[in-house]
Structure formats: structure tokens, C-alpha cells
Image (tube, grey):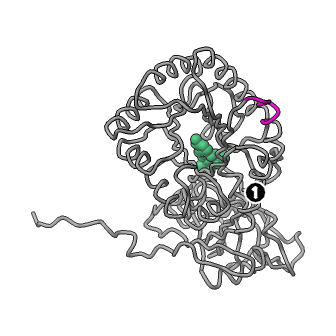
Amino acid sequence: MDSFEYLDGRLHCEEVALSDVARDYGTPLYVYSRDAIERAYLSYAQALEQTNALVCYAVKANSNLAVLNILARLGAGFDIVSLGELERVLQAGGKPEKIVFSGVGKQAHEIQRALDVGIFCFNIESDAELDRVNQVAKDMGKIARISFRVNPDVDAGTHPYISTGLKENKFGIDIDHARQVYRRAAALDAVEVVGMDCHIGSQLTEMDPFLDAMDRLLSLIDELNEDGIRIHHLDLGGGLGVCYTDETPPTPSEYISKVLERLGDRPIQLIFEPGRSIVANAGVLLTRVEFLKQNGEKNFAIIDAAMNDLIRPALYSAYQEIIPVTMAEESPDTAKLWDLVGPVCETSDFLGKGRSLNLQAGDLLAVCSAGAYGFVMASNYNTRGRPAEVMVDDDQVFLVREREQVADLFKGESILPIDR
Ligand code: LLP
């Protein structure tokens, strides 16, 4: 989180004090650092400089148009999973020829639009989806470039809800069945087999599962070569972890150098789909303490952000640091242990438990590492408007998404027209 630092006891994002941002834009509020996003992307791009590799940012991690636009300007490609994400990328200036389309359930109209704009590749996840893509392309008189997401059956060693590369997961095509599917695809007339992909899970902190998966895919590529099927690109998905507290994941450049070593001199273009490692530590969620209360032995700080704003703690028991926006004057030994809970009517509505903090009502807190899977997973549960988002660029702050207003929350709903 090095774009977020204390200066004279006040937490800053780049050149801007977060207490000023909270005063101007209110809380709860997502704050992103342009510099942090750019540096994270460039750590991939620079490690791949001597290659023809493509870095396709996983839009699902944070799909704000400003984030996408910053990455598009740097030449990033994009990994999308829906028509909505496709339209966002185009709106933000992303190039269709650098888009890969992932996801297990692509609908015909989504495939159509992606073919219309000319995306780079469809990452196909099942036999049935192959037939659908082939049919849609045929009806349009086009050829769809395709890759198969192979499920290599490796344990990513991450939280079960974000592990995707095991046989028991819904993702991809069983590696034992993959050769047969490739052969079938090669015989279809409206698809062109160009690649192979995998994505074994998210928040991986070890290198080995990535390399094991890569080895399995490389052997499959060799087998396909024997069948006369040439694989032009290998897409290793996303998944590289970040430091939320004390994890020590490999850096993008460490990871990439191992991958390049494994690839050797094979004439295969590499693709990466990083999400979290580009944006997680480029964002915080600012929240204000509303009330302090004690129930039994427990100290609760009721804050104005809730599980609807940031669901990761409730959904995955995820740990994200929570730090004061202004350093307390008191010595730390006056700190107590607090559960930081939101106003939503659920026991799972917490952003942190047992955190040692000096707190008073009205204090501002920053939930760290909230740039990935934060706002994008926010909901309107309890008819709460989703937070605003701002982007800091040096000493400037830009509102990149307005706070939802109450009227927005039931827009499009209607009551029945007749009395009974
Ligand atoms: N490619 C595919 C096909 C994916 O499914 C994902 C993430 C990525 C790339 C990007 O992975 P990353 O680099 O961000 O690990 N909501 C969860 C994470 C879900 C990840 C889903 N797929 C969380 O908050 O931890």
C-alpha cells in the first residue's frame, strides 16, 4: 500500500490527505491511486518487455471506467466475462483486438456482440459452449478465434471459494478430456483454434501451483502438435496474490521470469489475466465511526460502511487491515479490541473483528487493500446506496462514480396498477 502513507500523522493517498477527501466526498468512499494502478500494471508489462505477451486485466476485479481507461492508455488488454464488461472496456477506450472473453455461461447475444467488435479470443469452458460459439459465428458468417480453458486439476492452496483449478470445480474442461475436445473443434468450420488457457484460483501466494498447471498445459500442447493442432497462445489466467497482512506472494516479475524459463524457446505467445494484483493495493475504503457500544465483553464500533459495500470479510472471512485516517495522539496501550460492524441487519456484517484501535465516535478509518473485489461486489442490500468512488492523481482528486442516491435505488420498480 505504498501509495497510501502517513504524513504528519495524516494518512495520504499520493499527495492528498484522506481526511480532506472524506470531508469533500463523504463516506463510505472508495479511493484509488492512479499511480499505484499504473505501477502494478507496469510491473507486468516491463517484465514482459522483450516478448509479444499480452496482459489482459481482469475487469471483474474493478471495472470503474476510470480504472479501465488508465490501463487502456498503457496498452493493456482486458479479460471480460459479460456483455456489460465488454461495453465498459469499449467505453473506456480498450481495444477489441486485445480482449479475451472468459466465463462458463456466455449467452448468444454476448457472443454476437463480441464477434461484431472483433475480440481476440473466446476462452471456451465446455463442449456445449463450443457448439454455441460455432453456431453463432456461422450464422454471422464469421470465424471465432477460440481457446479452451483447461482444468489442470491442481490445488491452488487458496480459499475454497476462490479455488478454480480442481476437478471438482465448475470451471474449464477436464484435462483428460481436453485433447478430444480440441480435435472436435479443429473439425468445425466457424471456429479457429488458437489458444489454451487456465485459471486455477485467486490470491495464490506460492509459485508452484502456477508452474504445475503450466507444465500440464505444455504437455497437452505437445500432444496436440502431434495431432496437427497448433496452439499459438497460452493464457495462464490471473491469480497472483497480494499482501493483505503478512502474505509474501511472488512479485509479478519473479512469477514471469519463472514462466518464461519454463516456456523456453517455444513460439507461443503468453497471456496473463491479472486482476487483484493490479488494483487491490491501489484502493482503500474510507468509513466513519458512527457509534461505540459494548455488549457483554465485546466492544463494537458501528461504522458507516457495511457488508453491502465490501463483502469480502463476510463472504470469505477475508482479512483486510483497518487503520486510522488520523493517527491517535494517545499511546497505543490505551487501544482496545474492537469489532468493526456495519448498519446492516446481519451478524455477518463486519469488516474486521478484534482490531486493536484507539477509537472515538466520528473517527475516520481506512479499510486497506480494497481496490479489488470491493466496489464491484457491492450491493444495495438493506436499500443502501453504493458508495462513491474517487481517483487520486498526484494532488488532484476526481469523482469517478457518484454516490447512489435513494431515488436511484427503486428506479425501474413499479407497483401494481389495479386494486383488487
Ligand atoms: N481470469 C479468470 C478466468 C478469473 O476467473 C479471474 C478471477 C481472474 C482472471 C482474475 O484473478 P485475480 O488475478 O484477480 O486473482 N471475489 C474474490 C475473487 C474471485 C476471483 C474470480 N476470478 C475475492 O474477493 O477474493
- The verdict on label 1 being within 8 Å of ligand 1 is no
Q: Nearer the viewer, residue 147 or 97?
A: 97
Please give the range of residues in magenta.
259-266
User: Which residue shows up at 54% across the image and 33% down it?
Assistant: 147
Horizontal side, residue 131 vs residue 86: left or right: left
The rendered magenta stretch, by its main secondary structure, is classed as helix
Q: In which quarter of the view is residue 411 placed?
A: bottom left
Horizontal side, residue 325 vs residue 101: left or right: right
Residue 192 against residue 60 in the figure, above or below: above
Report the number of numbered marks.
1
* Residue 398: % across, % down: 62, 78
* Residue 189: % across, % down: 40, 27
> Which residue is labeled 1 in the image?
42
Horizontal side, residue 347 vs residue 260: left or right: left
Horizontal side, residue 187 vs residue 369: left or right: left
User: Which residue shows up at 79% across the image and 38% down it?
Assistant: 206
The amino acid sitting under disc 1 is Leu
Q: Nearer the viewer, residue 185 or 4?
A: 185
Instruction: Residue 286: say if magenta.
Output: no
